Image (tube, rainbow, N blue to C red):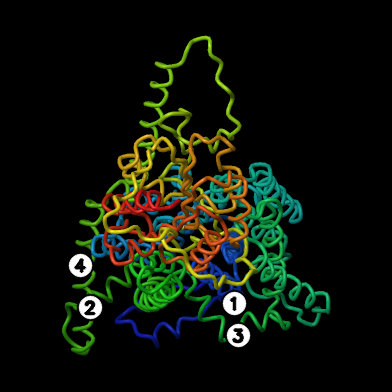
Amino acid sequence: MADVTCVPSPARVGVWSDSAVTRSPRIKGYARGLDGIRAIAVLGVVLYHAGVPFLPGGFLGVDLFFVVSGYLVTALLQREHDRTGRIDLRGFWLRRARRLLPALLLMLLVVCAATLACGRDLGAGLRWQLAGALTFSSNWLQIANGSSYLETMEPALLTHLWSLAVEEQFYLLWPLAVLFLLTVVKARRSRAALAVLVALASAAAMFAGYRTGTDPTRIYAATDTHGFGLLLGAALALARPASELDPVRGARRRGRGTDLLGFASLAVVLGGMVVLDLENPWTYRGGLLLVSLAAVGLVAVTIRGSGPVAKLLGSRVLRPVGERSYSLYLWHWPAVVMADRILAVDLGRPLAAAVGVVAAVLATEITFRLVERPIRRFGFRGYLRAARRVLLRRGRVRPVRRSMAWFAATCLGVVTVTAACGVVAAPARSGLEIQLAAGEQALAEASAAAQASTSATTVPSTTATPSTTPASTTPTTATQQPTPTTTAKPTTPTPSTSKPTTPTPTTSKPTTSKPTTSTPTSPKPTTTQQPKPPKNTPPPPEVPGDRIAMIGDSVMLAAAPSLLSRMPGASIDAVVSRQIWDLPGLLPGGAQDRPYVVIGLGTNGTEPAQTLVDALGALPESTVVVLVTTFGPQEWQDDANAQIAAAASTRAHTCVADWRAAIEGKKDLLAADGIHPGPEAGGIYADLVASTLRNCH
């Protein structure tokens, strides 16, 4: 997110004002269309993280940032070398710090303070995230800690800083490489070719490292596999016949080919944002590289300073957004995550995301006007000198301005103290992570007990019949299989979403489009389809746990301790991020030892009712099935519950356990994400399932 603006002498700095900043000129000939590219980049990222459905590839805005930054930084270094015969590395790194640190530090202070003020487990893992942010190693710490860029259950507040870490690592190492290239490699084209070769090697490493069905964080967030955009932008700067930043003279030489290149590049970039997503293998196997190459073409056309594309990108509509793109990128993700965590359950996820974006825009404008622009133009010393003059000296400073300055300084002090307390108080793990870990522990203990019981009662010469269930989905059973029920860690789930999008988000978004079938209009079944017995009739007996098989997602996993306590011996196969369409391979076969089946899916996406009906067709007709509804702020919740109800109405011996109705008025018992049950809510979940099983025949 490089920038090119001149810095007035600190001696000229007094009490800054908007007019003073405006008079500070840019470098002569700066291609204003680059701000338009930044605007497209940041708008794509913000809309993607806000959950806009028509932009699943908005994350490609990061790759636009990479290309622009690689170009500008390399051009600056090359111009300095051409003019002076050397590169002032210390000066370069100080300019980078002045450009990036002030806004970053302010954002970190506010976010750390907000975790303490807002609660809801927002501060979970804050200390290691803060360490990564301050050392520009967020991407590697996220990889080392097993964090997923696709985390949607409880996304970390500083996940988005991975891209800033990649850029800063580039800024640290690339000047040394540029100095070597300019000193040793004399041919301009040879320098550019070497940069292109390294970029292609990086893209090839991403291509080779991607594995379908696995978490892509290692190849997506790592500098070695996602640095090709920066290198391609650098190659463009090295290939230019002049190292000046100003547009190439000779607009007369512009032909139709240049215009076509501009429109084609813009179409590829925007088309990629609409077509690609983070679960598409082609995103990693050439998609990101193609968009980066299109971004290079867009920059090449823009720096000429003429033509319809350059004029469009340099318009007054896009330029102000591009100028604020860095601050907006810093603020948007924490704001969206906080709004989602606090407001999504009551307002719904789309409206909560909108509130987060508005808050981010306000914070961006304050940061840009009061921190980022003054420091970038006047330097740290000039900024502090002006602040001291406003706060302490008498004279020409108006009382209103002085009062506002003291108010801002007081707020900054309060925020700083609160932020320090927030860092100290931040838990290592969230309540949901602890709850999911407890569920896995309960299932593991049940598995161990079943294994011990089997070993004690099995005749040595007896040969066990091999299971036909895949190892990854083998249920944990108190009487059968000893294999643990889950394979994913609760702290690093691999959701099937492209949003933290996603975005974003506390649960995974379905990887396929919403079902095309219309929402069923059939009446919703009650928790039992049998008529109420006479008052003098004793209630039906409890269903023994060793006759029950349960299949579910992370909601059932969180309730697993309560389910096992309520129904000892039940077989529970519950994992994080499981989808409804995974069900056909998970249902038990024709054996009648567990004639009661409980299915708790739909948290992570919806499917047509026929998908459930077809899957349930593999069960014997006499099997009693209980379908558990979903609850949460997901936009597909109502449709998922309608499809569940429709599926239940088409099959005999099938009932609905209405978890949504059971927990609707008890949201405070849920985890911070407003979806997963806490310990007490887990008991309600277990009682609901047991009661529905007892009354369903």
Labelled pair 3, 1 in contact (Cβ < 8 Å): yes
Task: Decide if residue 422 is in sight here.
Answer: yes
Horizontal and vertical percent for residue 381? 32, 68
Which label sits on residue 413?
A: 4
Q: Quadrant of residue 280?
A: bottom right
Cα distance in 3D space between marks 4 and 1:
36 Å
Q: Amino acid at mark 2?
A: Arg
Task: Decide if residue 84 is in sight here.
Answer: no
Q: First in sequence, mark 1 or 2: give its number.
A: 1
Secondary structure beneath label 4: helix
Q: First in sequence, mark 2 or 3: give its number.
A: 3
Secondary structure beneath label 1: helix
Q: Amino acid at mark 3?
A: Ser
Q: Which residue is mark 3?
A: 315
Q: Which residue is mark 2?
A: 389
Cα distance in 3D space between marks 1 and 2:
36 Å
Relative to 14, does residue 91 appear above or below in the rendering? above
Which residue lies at the image location 28% right of the left edge and 49% below the top edge? 679
